[in-house]
Image: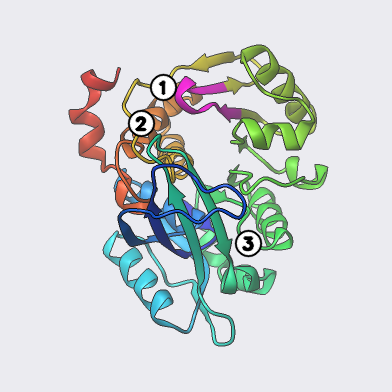
Amino acid sequence: MKIVVIGSTNTDMVIKTGHLPLPGETILGGEFFMNPGGKGANQAVAASRLGGNVAFISKTGNDIFGEQSVENLRREGVNTENMVVDKEKPSGVALITVDSKAENCIVVAPGSNMTLKPDDIDKAIKQIGMAEIVLLQLEIPIETVEYAAQIAYRNNKKVILNPAPAQKLSDLILKTIYILTPNETEAEILTGVKVTNTETAEEAAQILKNKGVEIVIITMGANGAFIYTDSLSELIPAPEVKAVDTTAAGDTFNGALAVAISEGFNVREAVQFANKAASIAVTRLGAQVSTPCRAELHSAGKKLK
């Protein structure tokens, strides 16, 4: 396995609305549908669809949601041999509201995701040892994220951390990170710098770089992604598209980034590849179902440049 993703598995329950409800407001929505989700599973599926050789380490409940999640991942070509079933906690679910401008609000009940522990990582140590890249997010316990990152780092694996949902991170974990991919909000929480343009993005990225992160990529929505390395400070624009649902844009970006890095792309090329994949994803409803396959990136190449 070139890419091992460690993270969450959820079932997304989505309602489309004209606008997002205010506190205390009840509104009538439109279409309702359920999709497989979870940031970890989304990124694993994105990487697999885009040509990656992917294994996934996660935990589900002993219920229909968990069974469907594992079955779907296998259909997507993801290795699930180190997915674990929690016999007590239910599988994670996410309640998602999407408005007419493609903005969303999400509430997650993590369930079994929060029982993925360092012991579960130990059981998958052989699989991690065969990987080139370990991709992590923050919908599982932070102690597990730190433990997995340390193991990967000590074994000379490239650790990509998508620090979402946003929270503070210790300097200890930042020193293990090859690529950190916060969005503007997450970058502000990590650094205290409000990211509004390339100048403030560079200021935030410098702080993270000084804490030991090798490469910082700040995703900036429709504006693209800002790269900061020892030799590069540049905003890579995103293709212009009409967004329908931004739910899994970041997950698609991170899955695509992992694939590109595993194939030897330089970081600039990898971000261009990831931007293109995310731009296709936002034109579709849903999380995993919105992720493009590799052939779509090729066919959409000229259109999305």
Seen as rendered, the residue at the extreme left is 299
Q: Secondary structure at mark 2?
A: helix
What residue is pinned by disc 1? 238
Measured from the top left, where is residue 257 in percent x and y?
45, 36
Measured from the top left, where is residue 254 in percent x and y?
48, 41
Task: Work out how far the residue at label 2 is from the one at label 3, CA to CA, in angstroms.
Answer: 27 Å
Asked whether the residues under the numbered discs 2 and 1 touch, taking CB atoms below 8 Å apart as contact, a structural biologist would say yes
Q: Quadrant of residue 161?
A: top right
The answer to whether 153 is drawn above or below residue 223 in the figure is below
The answer to whether 51 is drawn above or below residue 229 in the figure is below
What amino acid does circle 3 point to?
Ile
Q: Which residues are magenta?
A: 217-226
Q: Mark 2 or mark 3: name the one nearer the start of the chain.
A: 3
What residue is pinned by disc 2? 279
Q: Quadrant of the C terminus?
A: top left
What residue is rendered at 63% in x and 21% in y? 229
Residue 53 visible in this rendered orientation of the protein:
no
